[in-house]
Amino acid sequence: MTQPVPWPKVKRSLIAILRGIHPDEAEAIVETLIDSGFELIEVPLNSPDPFVSIERLCKRFGNDCYIGAGTVLNATDCARVADLGGRLMVSPNVDADVLAMAHERQLVTMPGVFSPTEAFLALRCGASALKFFPASVLGPSGIAAQLAVLPKETVVGAVGGVSDKNLATYMAVGIRAVGLGSSLYRPGMTTSEVRDAALTSVHAYDRFG
């Protein structure tokens, strides 16, 4: 089993998923998120010019938080994220080649899993954390059932349909990390709207924690 890059020691394991963000707005949005208490920032690679956004964000905020990419589907893109200064790699699936590259480049990894088979494969490949996706299909009880057989030290996250409104129900069953997408950011939102959504999410997380 590959020894994983440890999950970072952050105050809140809240991952901002900025799907659809444009490079020209990325810095202002992420500054707002950091000011609101986020330390984990994901730019999905199916966003417009994602590598431009990642490069700009890493240069400006790379020392303050973990900037990285989501929807990473191949090892080449994974290496490119690392070359730009990214420290976080999130994917919707378990791909051994992607995880091997991420480990070689010392990226924190969070591959998507849905079943115990995928979860244990991801851990064997050195995943830093598991992303149960889509969480809305499994629900807290479905994830909790799998937690019973996973190693106790496993960092387990939920992504897909999770928001400030149901975050506590996931955390109550042992979820340690939460990815927030459209409830936090959608293309066209202003920085003020993102700030309001971010603070609401942070408060929901802190109330449970």
Image (cartoon, helix red, strand yellow):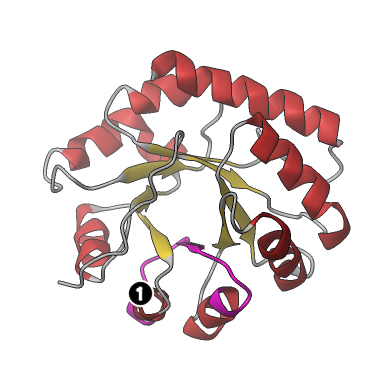
How busy is the neighbourhood of tag 1: few (under 14 within 10 Å), some, or many (20 plus)? Answer: many
Residue 165 visible at all: no
Q: Nearer the viewer, residue 175 or 67?
A: 67
The residue indicated by pointer 1 is 103
Locate the C terminus by quadrant. top left
Residue type, numbered disc 1: His
* Outermost residue to the bottom: 76
Residue drawn 82% across and 58% down?
A: 22
Horizontal side of residue 38 vs 2, given as left or right: right
Please say whether residue 85 is one of the residues in the magenta stretch.
yes
Magenta part of the protein: which range? Answer: 82-97
Q: Secondary structure at mark 1?
A: helix
Vertical relation: 17 (above or below) 117: above
Residue 188 location, x and y as percent?
A: 87, 43
Numbered-mark total = 1
Residue 111 location, x and y as percent?
A: 39, 61
Vertical relation: 27 (above or below) 76: above
Q: Nearer the viewer, residue 140 or 90?
A: 90
